[in-house]
C-alpha cells in the first residue's frame, strides 16, 4: 500500500469520467475544509494481509490528522503511486472498513466517488506536516518458526 497524505485548507472534487461501471453513479461535486486527504494505492500484494494494512492505515491517518489539528479525513483511491494494483472490489471494501473504524473513534470521514477520475481543487499550506508519504509492504510468506 502506498499512502500520500495531504492536509488541505480546502479540498474539492467534481466527478468527471467514470472508469469502473460496476460501482454506483456519483456525479455530485463536493467541497471540504480543514481536511486530511489520503491518496491511497492498494497493491495486489495487499490482498494477502488486509488486517495488517488496515491497522497501519488507521494509525497513520490518525497521526497525520492530529499533526494537522483536524478530525476530518477523506479517503481517495489513487492508483498512480505504484505499478501494482489490487482489485477494485478489494480496494473499495478495504476503504469501507477503514472508514467505519475511523468513524467509531470520532473522526468525520468520507470517500471520493469510487471508480471515477475527478477534477480536483486543492489548497494546501506549505509546511512539512501537510505532506506525508508512507509505504507499507505485506510480507508474501509468513514465517512460522
Image (spheres, rainbow, N blue to C red):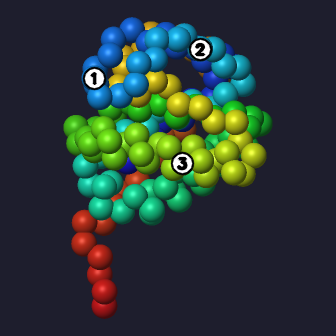
* Distance of label 2 from label 1 (alpha carbons): 21 Å
Q: Which mark identifies residue 30?
A: 2
* Distance of label 3 from label 2 (alpha carbons): 21 Å
Q: Nearer the viewer, mark 2 or mark 1?
A: 1
Q: Nearer the viewer, mark 3 or mark 1?
A: 1
Left or right: 32 in relation to 29: right
- Whether residue 76 is visible to the viewer of this picture, yes or no, is yes
Q: Which residue is mark 3?
A: 98
Left or right: 86 in relation to 94: left
The residue at the point 30 percent across, 61 percent down is: 48
In the image shown, does 7 or 77 lie closer to the viewer?
Answer: 77
* Distance of label 3 from label 1 (alpha carbons): 23 Å
Q: Where residue 8 sits: x, y (%)?
A: 64, 23
- Whether residue 126 is visible to the viewer of this picture, yes or no, is no
- The disc, 3 or 2, on the residue closer to the chain's N-terminal end is 2
Up/down of 135 relative to 37, above or below = below
Element assignment for label 2: strand
In contact (CB < 8 Å): disc 2 and disc 1: no
The residue at the point 50 percent across, 25 percent down is: 112
The residue at the point 42 percent across, 45 percent down is: 93
In contact (CB < 8 Å): disc 3 and disc 2: no
Amino acid at each position: 500500500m502506498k499512502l500520500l497524505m495531504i492536509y488541505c485548507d480546502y479540498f474539492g472534487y467534481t466527478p468527471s469520467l467514470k472508469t469502473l461501471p460496476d460501482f454506483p453513479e456519483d456525479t455530485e461535486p463536493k467541497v471540504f475544509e480543514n481536511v486530511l486527504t489520503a491518496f491511497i494505492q492498494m497493491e495486489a500484494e495487499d490482498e494477502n494481509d488486509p488486517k495488517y494494512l488496515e491497522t497501519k492505515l488507521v494509525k497513520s491517518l490518525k497521526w497525520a490528522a492530529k499533526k494537522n489539528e483536524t478530525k476530518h479525513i477523506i479517503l481517495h483511491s489513487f492508483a498512480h503511486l505504484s505499478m501494482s494494483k489490487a482489485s477494485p472490489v478489494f480496494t473499495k471494501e478495504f476503504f469501507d472498513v477503514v472508514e467505519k473504524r475511523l468513524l467509531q473513534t470520532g473522526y468525520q470521514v468520507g470517500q471520493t466517488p469510487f471508480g471515477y477520475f475527478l477534477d480536483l481543487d486543492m489548497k494546501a499550506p506549505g509546511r512539512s506536516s501537510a505532506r506525508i508519504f508512507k509505504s507499507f509492504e505485506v510480507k508474501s510468506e509468513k514465517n512460522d518458526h
